[in-house]
Amino acid sequence: MLTPRDHTMPVILNEPLSFLQRLTEYMEHTYLIHQANTTTDSMERMKCVAAFAVSAVASQWERTGKPFNPLLGETYELIREDLGFRWMSEQVSHHPPVSAFHAEGLQEDFLFHGSIYPKLKFWGKSVEAEPKGIISLELPKHNEAYTWTNPTCCVHNIIVGQLWIEQYGNVEVINHKTGERCSLIFKPCGLFGKELHKVEGYILDKSKKKLCAIYGKWTECLYTVDADTFDAHKKSDKKNSEEKKSNMQTSVDEEPEEMPLPDGDTVQVIPGSELIWRIAPRPDNSAEFYAFSTFAMQLNELEEDMKGVLPPTDCRLRPDIRHMEKGDIDSASAEKKRVEEKQRLSRKNRSKSTEEWKTRWFHQGTNPHNKAQDWLYSNSYWDRNYSLLPDIY
C-alpha cells in the first residue's frame, strides 16, 4: 500500500523493506534481458523486453504491506552473480519523493536505469499510485535502447475489508533504434472481475503494422501469438461475452467491495501461442511473510563480510526495518519515529543556512533516448569511497 509521505503511518501497516528494496524486485526475472541479448531478431528481443517490463511489476501481486518511505540520501545495493547483475539506488529527493536506480550486467551486457516518483490519489476506499518516471534498458551488443513507464497501481479497501491490488493503464515499450514498439494495456478489473490482472497488446513496426500480439496476466504469465489469430479470438470472445452480458444488469459506477474472482484461474491459451514468461512460484511460507517472493525474502540479508563494505546509508542498516523484520513492532515504531524526526530536523537546519542537499550518486539531466528530464547515474558508487556520506540513521 502506498501512502502520502507527510503522514506518519503506524508501522504495523508496513512490510520490512524500504521502497528502494521494493524497486530492486524489478530484477527478479533478469533472465529475460539475457535472453533478449542472445537473439539476432529485433522482434524476438522486443518480446523479451516487453515480458521483462511486465514481470518487473509482478511482485506487487498481493503485496498490501507498505514499504518504508526511504529517507533522503538512503541507498541500496544488490549484487547477484547468479543472475548476472549489480544494482544501486538512491533516494534523491524527499519533496517530491524520487527514487533513482542504476543496474548493470556483470558482463557489461546491459544497463537498466530510471527514476520513480509515485504520484498518489485517494478515492475514498482506494488509493491509486501513478508511477511517474522513465525506465530505460540499453543493450550495447545490439546498440539498442528501450524506454517505458509502469502502469498505475491501485490498492482497494484501505479503510475496511480485504485489501486487494490491481494494475491498469497503457504501457508502451519503445525500441529507439528500430522504431518498433510494444503497446500494452493493463486492464482494469471491471465490476465482475472478468478482466482482472489481464494484459494484452501488440508489437508494431515503425509504420505501426502489427507484427504479433502479446497477452496474459501480470500475476501469472505472458504469451505471444500471430496478430490475426489474436484478433479473431478476441472477436469471438467479445461475441460470447455480449450474449452473457445481455442477461445481466450492470452498474458502471460501482466499485467491487471484495476482490473479484478472476474469470478462470489461468490464462486461456490461444492455439499457436508461445509462452514468453511465467512468474516464479512463491515459497510455501509466503503468506506468513508479507506475500514475499523468494527474491524479496533475500533483500535484507546482511552477511558479516558486507558490514565493512556497505555505505552507512544502505537500507540493510536501517534500524526500524531491522526491528520489524525481527518482529519487534514497538522498537520498530520508536525507531521509525526517531529517524523521521532526525530527517525533519536536518531539513529544518538546512533551510536556516545556505546549505543545499547534494545527491551523491545521481545528477539531474536529460534522458539520452527520449530527451525527458531524468536522474542519471554519476558512475562512482562502486569505487567504494563512502567517507563523506551523511549520517541519516
Image: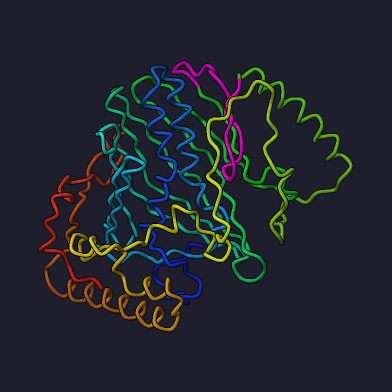
Work out whether 204 lies above or below 320.
above
User: In the image, residue 132 lies at what x, y percent?
Assistant: 41, 48
Relative side of 344 to 164, left or right: left
Can you give x and y, in whole percent of width and height, for residue 260 in the image? 72, 53
Q: Quadrant of the C terminus?
A: bottom left
- Residue 369 in picture, x, y percent from top left: 30, 31
Quarter of the view holding residue 134: top left
Up-down relation of residue 187 to residue 259 (above or below): above
Q: For residue 230, what is the image quadrant? A: top right
Q: 354 and 380: which one is in front?
A: 380
Residue placed most toward the observer, 4 or 74 = 74
Q: How is the image coloured?
A: rainbow
Answer left or right for 230 relative to 280. Answer: right
Find the magenta span and give its range.
204-225
What main secondary structure does the magenta stretch of the protein show? strand
Q: Residue at x 86, y 45 (%)?
A: 248
Q: Which residue ends up furthest to the right in the rendered image?
A: 247
Q: Which x, y percent locates residue 196?
A: 66, 46
- x 24%, y 60%: residue: 306
Q: Give the total of numbered labels.
A: 0
Left or right of residue 358: residue 166:
right
318 magenta-colored: no
Is residue 212 one of those drawn in magenta? yes
Q: Residue at x 57, y 26 (%)?
A: 224
Q: Nearer the viewer, residue 264 or 73?
A: 264
